[in-house]
Amino acid sequence: MKNKTSTPDLNLTSNERIYLESPSIFKPKKILNFNTKGLKIYTFKAGFKKGNKDLLIIIFDKLVNTASVYSKTSTPSAPIIWDKKYNKGKTKALIVNSGNANAHTGKKGIDIINSYVMFLSKILNCKKSEILVSSTGVIGELFKPELIIKQIKKISKNKSGKIIEAAKAIMTTDTYPKLSNKKFILNRKRYNIFGIAKGSGMINPNMGTMLVYLFIEPYISKNNLKKLINENLDNTFNAITVDSDTSTSDTLALFSLDQSKINLNTNKNFNIVSSAISAIMKDLSLQVVKDGEGLTKLVQVNILKASSKNQAKKIAFSIANSPLVKTAISGQDANWGRIIMAIGKTQEKIQQNKIKISFGSNILCEKGSIYKKINYKKISNYMKNNIVIINVELGLGNDSFTVHGNDLTHEYIRINGDYRS
Amino acid sequence: MKNKTSTPDLNLTSNERIYLESPSIFKPKKILNFNTKGLKIYTFKAGFKKGNKDLLIIIFDKLVNTASVYSKTSTPSAPIIWDKKYNKGKTKALIVNSGNANAHTGKKGIDIINSYVMFLSKILNCKKSEILVSSTGVIGELFKPELIIKQIKKISKNKSGKIIEAAKAIMTTDTYPKLSNKKFILNRKRYNIFGIAKGSGMINPNMGTMLVYLFIEPYISKNNLKKLINENLDNTFNAITVDSDTSTSDTLALFSLDQSKINLNTNKNFNIVSSAISAIMKDLSLQVVKDGEGLTKLVQVNILKASSKNQAKKIAFSIANSPLVKTAISGQDANWGRIIMAIGKTQEKIQQNKIKISFGSNILCEKGSIYKKINYKKISNYMKNNIVIINVELGLGNDSFTVHGNDLTHEYIRINGDYRS
């Protein structure tokens, strides 16, 4: 292990570093209108909310393999109940509306889905189990399936839209659309993975977080799709938090567009695809967290030298979710005492005299008490940055975990106090 | 079981109801300068913070029996480490400073305590194990023991102060002093219990919460003191939350002043004393929560008909700590969908179609979906109240739990963003 005390090991890839340290972190990423062969995109103003488009329908050219993960909540939305019950990993179409979550709507919520899914499945001549559905927005309100059916009727007349329109149609309090595109090369051939995501409140993962749809060009079996998601979830969407609240609607789905064949039977090939999936999931998850409701700063919490990955993760989330840590950061106060508090409240077995804390490269505490040579001027400047990196070395072992979160601001209160009014 | 749907069973005693429904909930309680025989109170401006008094020294007339409970944090402050190590349930004096928590100060923090405790113990001719210490305030900063020693030297010249001064000297971001006095009658004789408390941020109990000192006039054995605390902690200080953060310094101590003898060997007598202790703990814990940082509304969350008390408690805290629930309440929005979300994120095994939610007596959802006859006008008026009561019936069993919390406001952000600057 490295042991340079002034530059703690952040476990960042160079890409992550560039992403995190980019001065444009608070601007939407350059919009890419990449190739989306294998699917058709339709977006509509269906009337779930005022003004913007609020309905996305994607129709796949083929019946595509799919793997998906859902919120671990014990109060799942009707679409999650539906998808888990019916979808068997073969998908012909995806329907997503934003503005109404169809959550806690009981049997009626399921009936609503049944109506619009049956309608589309007849048109597409597919089974209802081959249509995947999601809804995001206000919980507990019913809506008329006709809102969606009316738009389905228009599909034949519309031409396919761009991926950016898909990303926009699923937004709620998001301030910009989230999309990403990665390429990977296998046996000298180039393949695309692309994806869209939404989310900005109620974000604290417990599996897949928010709505995320990923599309990979080559044919991949259902089992391998599942494996590819599970291998990459923990360090991407399960490593971000905006407000510690977990949505009833979190969904992540990976579709294989079956545009060509690849061989995933070797470890080498599997790893090439897996790291491309990892990159796109990391990129989209960071796009989500940097659009967290009301944030002024992105916060990266690195727990290093923990006795287990689980311990590192628990402590990282405790820090990233602490209202007192989050408000200190929005107040540009390097209040490391609150980090100590957040470590302690996990009740994890640690050794206080081994804890070392730095903000960026500025050490604040080591060997169990305040660092003797704190450079208050330097740290005060550091806290003005848009990105604050908190490093905690526990001195117990070799495990680490990184969580991305953000600060807690007046704007968060405003957005969430006024959301429905 | 009662089954009247419009008036859910809140499990409130009539006293609790009066307390919660009092229009003066946001005003400090009428200050009582009750009898405090058996101890001397000294308060000082020691220089831990600007302006107000910040040091309390209580000296008991006798060596008194004591029982105490502390934060379950894994990063306890030096005073907690000290008290747990030395105090054996016999106390001659209590020293509390506010403004510096002496937390995460390592061996030096212990040395600081040793200095001022040794100084006082020589004057009082007692053992150092007979002096109980607490500190509250900023974490991680060292201070000179002379700050306290200098004031100890003045004790012999000062006369004993009033209990209100003790309550004031331990305040940090509290907006008013918290004190309480209860009487109980045993065998036709009247006895006093009185207490003081402080706290307003970093409050989510994991045992004793914040600083709480309770004094009971008659002689009670150490074991019975311990039993009296443990019997009442769960429904008082362990049933409140301000911001889900747990202090490194939480301490609750109960001192028996040995002013008379009582017989606690019968269940009946023990219960009389226990319910008096319960009342004073409930009163002080509600005083603490209604002084939560930045609050505009007190929130009572009642989980009813749960399958276990543990389940009820977990769900109650999940609701009371959810930033989305708390901001909805500050925005006067009866957003019951966020209650559903907060129930779900506990991952407790529940049945969605049995959940019933009401705000006050206004039903919002039942049988798994929105209530048909919601009176929006009535509920909108209800949400303007200073006290919002959220009732969740799970329809699973007979267990219940009540948590008191508050809303999340701009003012909380302001207080905690600016705390040290």
Image: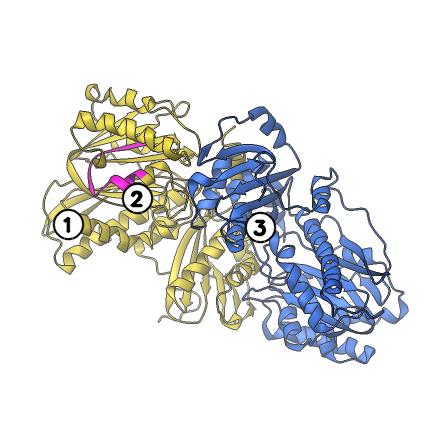
Chain colours: A yellow, B blue
Of the residues tagged 2 and 3, which is closer to the observer?
A: 3
Residue B66 shown in magenta: no
Region in magenta: A82-96
As displayed, is residue A195 above or below residue A337? above
Quarter assignment of residue B231: bottom right
Frontmost residue, B213 versus A77: A77
Is there one chain holding both mark 2 and mark 1? yes
For residue A396, side relative to residue A270 (left or right) = right
The residue wearing badge 2 is A252
Q: What crowding class fits label 1: few (fewer than 14 Cα within 10 Å), some (14-19), or many (20 or more)?
A: few
Query: Which numbered marker is on residue A185?
Result: 1
Of residues B97 and B266, the one drawn nearer to the viewer in this rendering: B266
Q: Chain of mark 1?
A: A
In the image, what residue type sits under mark 3?
Phe
- Distance, label 2 to label 3, CA atoms, is 35 Å
* Residue A297 in the image: above or below residue B216: above
Left or right: residue B214 compared with residue A255: right
The image quarter containing residue A7 is bottom left
Residue A221: x %, y % from top left: 15, 48
Query: The N terminus of chain A appears in which quarter of the rendering?
Result: bottom left
Farthest residue, direction front: B1
In contact (CB < 8 Å): disc 3 and disc 1: no
Does the CB distance between marks 2 and 1 fall below 8 Å?
A: no
Q: Nearer the viewer, mark 3 or mark 1?
A: 3
Q: Under tag 2, what secondary structure?
A: strand
> Can residue A419 be seen in this snapshot?
yes
Q: Residues within 10 Å of mark 2 (few under 14, many from 20)?
A: many
Q: Residue B83 in the image: x percent, y percent?
A: 66, 72
Q: Residue at x 57, y 64 (%)?
A: B72
Q: Which residue is mark 3?
A: B401
